Image: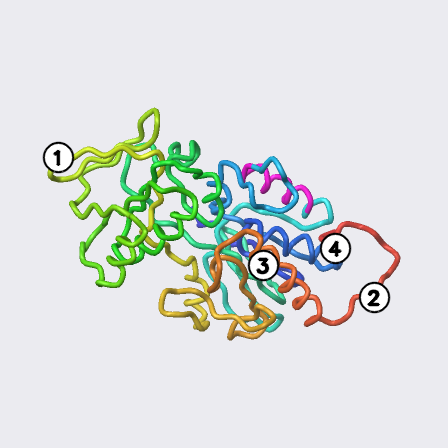
Amino acid sequence: MTARQPDTPTTAIDCLIVGGGPGGLTAALYLARFRRSCLVVDAGCSRASWIPRSHNYPGFPPGINGNDLLVRLREQASGYGARLEHGRVEHIEPHADGFSVRYGDKRCVTRRIILATGIEDTLPEMPDVEQAIGEGKVRLCAICDGYEVDGDNVAVYGEAENAISHAVFLRTFTEQVTVVVHGEPNACDQAVALAEHYGIRLISDRVESLHPCQSGIELLTCSGERHHFDIIYPSLGARFRSELAVQLGIECDECGGIRVDDHLQTSLRGLYAIGDVTMGLKQMSVAIGQAAQAATAVHNSLEANPWGGSRAATMG
């Protein structure tokens, strides 16, 4: 039996968007409303899907669940003609018309690309960690939800110096902040002095286990000490999903964040990057602002598409 060959692309689309988080879907919305043909290929791993309820996303005073926001954005983008497909883009290469792209058993040719692939947080080893995130016991972004901490007993779990800087930020919202050191226990004198100044407790004993409980998270150290926290913020780093950029030789920083210019274009002409996969503040509002900017730059980089009197869907 012969292996199925990838679908052969026909005409080039104007723009492929890799990633269907808030940034990628906003870029699709803008491009579709510019009457450009655009396709979103989404692997279904947007960081926004982890959000139980965001209270700092503009326009939703009661807050909004991350998945609910994604549903609304998909509906809005597809309503204007953007095509959305589930899949993982595995390969991009230059093509006479722009780029040839392979995702699963499909191929397409696209004149421009926007990478909106995001980052992947390193989560602590603990049972039912996804459920704990959904219940707000494990939280991934103090900028997003620090306001809701409001006096809770909070731990920051991570490498000493980085965790201390996060803990100092969280002191804005509670007096009860503990740094639980993961890995090497050493921190510079300045970081330790900062923790002492702000009344931040340090636990340097190695963690044996973390377990969700009814009222928060229970932590057991290797020496047998038990500690209870209402909330734990992991500060264990994250991986930039920039493999496609690296594959193409695009300029990235030492951590893998994609470097872009003022129009969100990478070092490769015709390829743009937005949101968490670039360097800068990791916030949905930042990603959607960059999406508007990048989509407009893509539109302006292509030849004009004067109105022909049809309001048919962009993709036909």
Which numbered mark, 1 or 3, is in the foreground of this view?
1
Which of pointers 2 and 1 lies earlier in the amino acid sequence? 1
Which numbered mark, 2 or 3, is in the foreground of this view?
2
- Residue bounds of the magenta highlight: 65-76
Amino acid type, callout 4: Arg
Q: Position of residue 70 (x, y in %)?
A: 58, 42
Amino acid type, callout 1: Gly
Horizontal arrangement in the rendering, residue 309 relative to residue 273 (left or right): right
For label 1, the residue is 224
Amino acid type, callout 3: Cys
Which of pointers 1 and 3 lies earlier in the amino acid sequence? 3
Measure how far apart labels 4 and 3 are at the Cα level.
21 Å
For label 2, the residue is 306
Measure how far apart labels 2 and 3 are at the Cα level.
25 Å
Between 75 and 123, the residue placed more toward the observer is 123
237 drawn magenta:
no
Measure how far apart labels 1 and 4 are at the Cα level.
60 Å
Measure how far apart labels 2 and 1 are at the Cα level.
71 Å
Q: Residues within 10 Å of mark 2 (few under 14, many from 20)?
A: few
Which numbered mark, 1 or 4, is in the foreground of this view?
1
User: Mark 2 falls on what kind of element?
Assistant: loop
The label number, if any, that marks residue 108 in the structure image: 3
For label 4, the residue is 33
